[in-house]
Amino acid sequence: MAQGASRMRRILAGSVLAAGIVAAGYLLQAEIRSAVRRPPVRLHQPLPPLVVDRDGTDVELADVIRGKRSVVVFHSHSCRVCREMMPALDPLPPGLRLVLVRSGKEEARAADGAPPGLDACWDRHGDFARAFVALPTLLFVDERGLLVSGITGRRSRQFVRERLERFASGGTPPEKGRRL
């Protein structure tokens, strides 16, 4: 009988320990989330401060795109939807700068399948991943550095081409269908 009670106490102690570990995990997770808040992303406002690696040097994305209508593409080569979308960007309409930001898992130097003439960067610090969850994400940023529109997730080539053409001609891609 004493042996059964001893076994029950061990089981109960193990259960209490497991519950404590789970509770500590939840508290730690909440603490990490509060420390890694997403920067606010709003239309018709400058992009939040996003640091990217460009040729081995950390730079602000705003400095990369300053002064020119830009299409910033956040994607991963391992993302099938991202690879399917890349041909829609080639050729890029005249007057636009293309900035390709690879996910933190991949270096920008591996720009396989990307159109020529792009500005390749790498999200080494995870700033983009924290600000924009979905892959791929296309951001339309005007020459003043203001975010005017965006596209996330799977879109047809025609959909992407139409928005690129409209943006290149000085218009704003319609916000309908935008999911940021």
Image (cartoon, grey):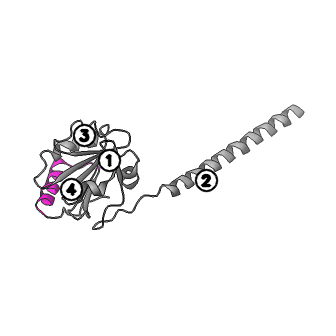
The residues tagged by marks 1 and 2 sit, at their Cα atoms, a distance apart of: 29 Å
Name the residue rendered at 53%, 52% in the picture. 32
Write down the quadrant of residue 55 in the picture. Answer: top left
Classify mark 1: residues with Cα within 10 Å, few (<14), some (14-19) or many (20+).
many
Looking at the image, the residue that sits furthest to the top is 3
Contact flag, marks 4 and 2 (Cβ < 8 Å): no
For discs 3 and 4, the disc positioned in front in the rendered view: 4
Q: According to the image, label 3 marks what residue?
A: 83
Q: Residue at x 35, y 61 (%)?
A: 48
- Which amino acid type is marked by label 3? Arg
Amino acid marked by disc 1: Leu
Compare residues 169 and 21 and report the one nearer the observer. 169
**Where the N terminus falls, by quadrant?**
top right
Disc 2 residue crowd, few under 14, some 14–19, many 20+, Cα 10 Å: few
Q: Position of residue 16 (x, y in %)?
A: 73, 45
Q: Which residue is mark 4?
A: 70
Q: Which residue is mark 1?
A: 135
